[in-house]
Image (tube, rainbow, N blue to C red):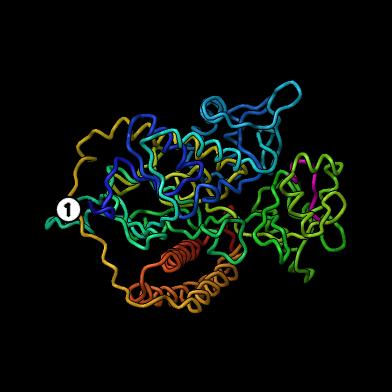
Amino acid sequence: MDETFVSTDILIIGLGIAGATVAYKLAEAGLNVVVVLKGTLEDDGNTHYAQGGIVYKGDSDSPELLYKDIMEAGSWVNNPEAVKIVAFEGPKILKEFLIDKIGVEFYRDEKGNLEFTEEGAHSIRRIIFSGDKTGKAIITKLIESLKKFKNITILENHIAIDLITWQFHSKDPLRMYKDKTCLGAYVYDEKNKVVKNITAKATVLATGGMGKVYLFNTNPEIATGDGYAMAYRAGAELINMEYTQFHPTTLYHPLKKNFLLSESLRGEGAIIVNHKGERFLFKFDPRGELAPRDVVTRGIISELTSTGQECAFLDASKIGSKEKLKSRFPTIYETLESIGIDMSTDLIPIVPAFHFQCGGVKTDIYGKTNIKRLFAIGEVACNGLHGANRLASTSLLEGVVFGHYLAKFIVENIEKKIFKEFPEIEPWVDTGTEEADSILLKQDWNTLRAIMWNYVGPIRTRKRLKRSLVDIKNLQLGIEDFYKEAKISRDIIELRNAIQTGYIVALSAWANKKSIGSHYRID
């Protein structure tokens, strides 16, 4: 039996909160599920690093109020249908699935009631949390639950190369007359250095984001835009890619790069000051530190530009005692302490960094794309929930809610004829004969990330965007030749995807002449 040819009911690419929710619900329904992840179960995906919390329902809260907050943060260009589902059904789905069924432990008070925190642009304290590692608490429980299913196969250290489609990869002589249809994916097994041809009745993109495309970002190294690039090459529609959210507070220190300082710090009372110790954000918004992320980010950048300083500072001493900080933010406290910063007394150096992609592969509320049998969920997808800017702590809830919807659709429709048609597939052929030059790869990465930060960053201009398109296109031409000539490897796959994704973002930013939400142009 050729182990490079795998067939399954469902192929899920990625295993953050969205992918794990779908995997659980589909396996529970009796379907065979194969999950592909680039890293391992211990470190794969942004969910592992989500600090702040997940939106629930606070005291004196209402679905109408949450709806309003999400829409306002997204500059009212959100998809109202998606927002209503999250606002009106989200808390119920969260409780039934994450709390009651999976058993995620969120912080509770002495009476056993859930504790709430506040974050920017929320009208009320409605976010539940597990210290400052909420994502880790959720994904750990989800993965534990997945392991009990014998009909789930998890392939660690596997990276998808491209989606298999009827039009591009089948031997059907009449393939050009078929509707766009996804049949699975070509997947590189990094350990055994072989490419597997995985076919499936339905394929789910749950690949997360694209943080590594930017020089400064809060994402793990695996966030290289793979899902966006693969979907684009297969003919999927991508929308809102110019809406790149930047987080205002990441640690500015050479020993701890990409370390996020949760928005919950500001929700609990931390303030942002300049090098003179002066608060300055009220010049930009009456909400100060609790304004939406894009406003705070631009406020910090404007302050740094006008003063010539390299960083601003977060003052967490306002939150309370050392003991309170240790208890409420243990991971952040320990990390800062390891580099000589006492967050109960010292100012914490900060700079903005890329955090979240509000756009993505266009889907409906069930995760369906314009390609038949291809679904997308989580950060790689865009059903319009976030509009032009994501409201803090809605992304984890998004993964659970729309994971529920996607799984429900597949279970109810998987027996239909469309999911059972399989033409003969062309096997993967590796045309490369040379080992990739690591120096060239590193230089291309550095070039791409500098272009994206300087030209397609938090503040954009026509000239910068025009330059970015020219420079990234030159990179793209080079990497495609490299891709064909070099032996297949994770490094090549990731760089190719990152360059493609960067170009899509730059082109979307160029096309949208109007400043709105996290897309900000000064000309």
Q: Which residue is mark 1?
A: 424
Range drawn in magenta: 265-273
Most extreme residue toward the left, as rendered? 173
Q: Residue at x 72, y 58 (%)?
A: 251
Mark 1: amino acid? Glu
443 displayed left or right of 163: right
Extreme-front residue of the structure: 1
Q: Quadrant of residue 55?
A: top right
Question: Vertically, is 20 above or below 459?
Answer: above
Along the line of sight, which residue is nearer the eye, 405 or 161? 161
* Res 331 visible: yes
Q: Is residue 437 left or right of residue 275?
A: left
Q: Position of residue 71 (x, y in %)?
A: 57, 40
The image position of residue 483, as x and y in percent, is: 36, 72
Q: Is residue 336 left or right of residue 491?
A: right
- Write the residue at 72% across / 62% down: 252
Query: Foreground residue, 512 or 242?
Result: 242
**Within the image, what quadrant is residue 61 found in?**
top right
Residue nearest the observer in this picture, 202 or 409: 202
Determine whether 393 is above or below 29 in the image: below
> Picture quarter containing residue 256?
bottom right
Is 210 in the magenta?
Answer: no
Q: Is residue 429 left or right of residue 12?
A: left
Count of numbered tags:
1
Q: Under tag 1, what secondary structure?
A: loop
Residue nearer the viewer, 131 or 119: 131
Determine the residue positioned at 49% across, 32% down: 85
What is the x, y in percent for residue 174? Answer: 12, 55
Mark 1, Cα crowd under 10 Å, few <14 / some 14-19 / many 20+, is few
Q: Residue 266 colored magenta?
A: yes
